[in-house]
Image: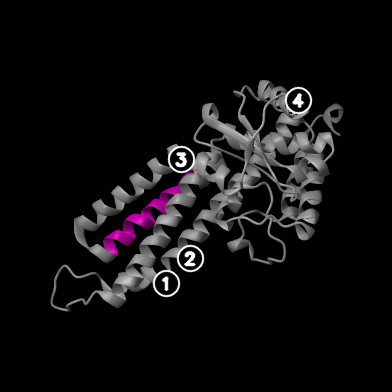
Amino acid sequence: MKNQLKTAALLALLSGLLISISYWIIGGSTGVIVGIALAAITNLFSWYQSDKIALAAYGAQPISPQQAPGLYEMVERLCQKANLPMPRLYIVPTQSPNAFATGRDPEHAAVAVTEGILNLLPEDELEAVIAHELSHIANRDTLTQAVAATIAGAISFLAQLVSYSMWYTPYSRDERNAPNPLGVLLTVILAPIAATIIQLAISRTREFAADAGSAKLTGNPRALARALQRLEAAAQSIPLHANPAFEPLLITNPFSGQFLSNLFSSHPSTEARVEALLKLEQQLPIRQRA
């Protein structure tokens, strides 16, 4: 519940930032209306197109039960336990081990795994990763993250548009409806940074919640802890080459060689996630511990 409230607050802050930017650069009630319209359009676009965009970004290919019977059986078993409809399954043709879920709700969800993760993880760890992705679906994190990414993208686009207009559009100091100079400056310089920070904070919050959901679903928090450690080590040697804008969807940061601070990271540190999972393990009845 705490994580859900935090996520809702961050999404509200992100939407508020978009509306404020429109107010600063356009001014008055017109700016507020434009901002609300932009927020509504970006949210609607995310609602219907987020899964298609994410799957296309990674070149994910649909697979049938005949092509991957073991994977289908595992996902079906976990879905029954979680009381979720069966998602569409996809394979990403890369040896970089990773996985992600996408879709606007559980009835329109998809789970994608890379060839690399299927080759790397033993069954119990792969099951824990799949349970993590199903927890994202159950919590509707897939839509939340898509909305956050789209709004952040709209803010960055708006800032870039304003930047171009500063060079090519002369502003008269005597015009009452001229854009607020301070607002323009803040939009161009600070707005994209603020939007990115908020988007990444949302992503980190949802990762902890999905880890806890996986532990509850499988009853084996240590399996996910081992999987996260294994995936982080593999990412250093086999990074995933894709658009970084979709990084928050993945179970781990796939880009090796990046030493970002917590503020600019899409995922909590593996150490923090493992520590949280081991704490959860201590709360399980002894007979359920791995």
Q: Which label sits in the foreground, 3 or 2? A: 3
Give how far across and how far down residue 253 sits, in percent.
67, 55
Do the numbered discs 2 and 1 sit on residues whose CB atoms are within 8 Å? Answer: yes
Q: Which residue is mark 3?
A: 49
Sequence-earlier tag: 2 or 4: 4
Q: Which residue is mark 1?
A: 189
The Cα–Cα distance between marks 1 and 3, rounded to whole angstroms, is 29 Å
The Cα–Cα distance between marks 2 and 4, rounded to whole angstroms, is 44 Å
Find numbered disc 1 in the image and state the secondary structure of the residue it sits on: helix
User: Going by the image, does 117 lie left or right of 91?
Assistant: right
Q: Relative to 218, does residue 237 appear above or below in the rendering?
A: below
The Cα–Cα distance between marks 3 and 2, rounded to whole angstroms, is 25 Å
Q: Amino acid at mark 4?
A: Pro
Give how far across and how far down residue 205 sits, in percent.
59, 48
Q: Which residue is mark 2?
A: 193
Q: Which residue is mark 4?
A: 69
Q: Amino acid at mark 3?
A: Gln
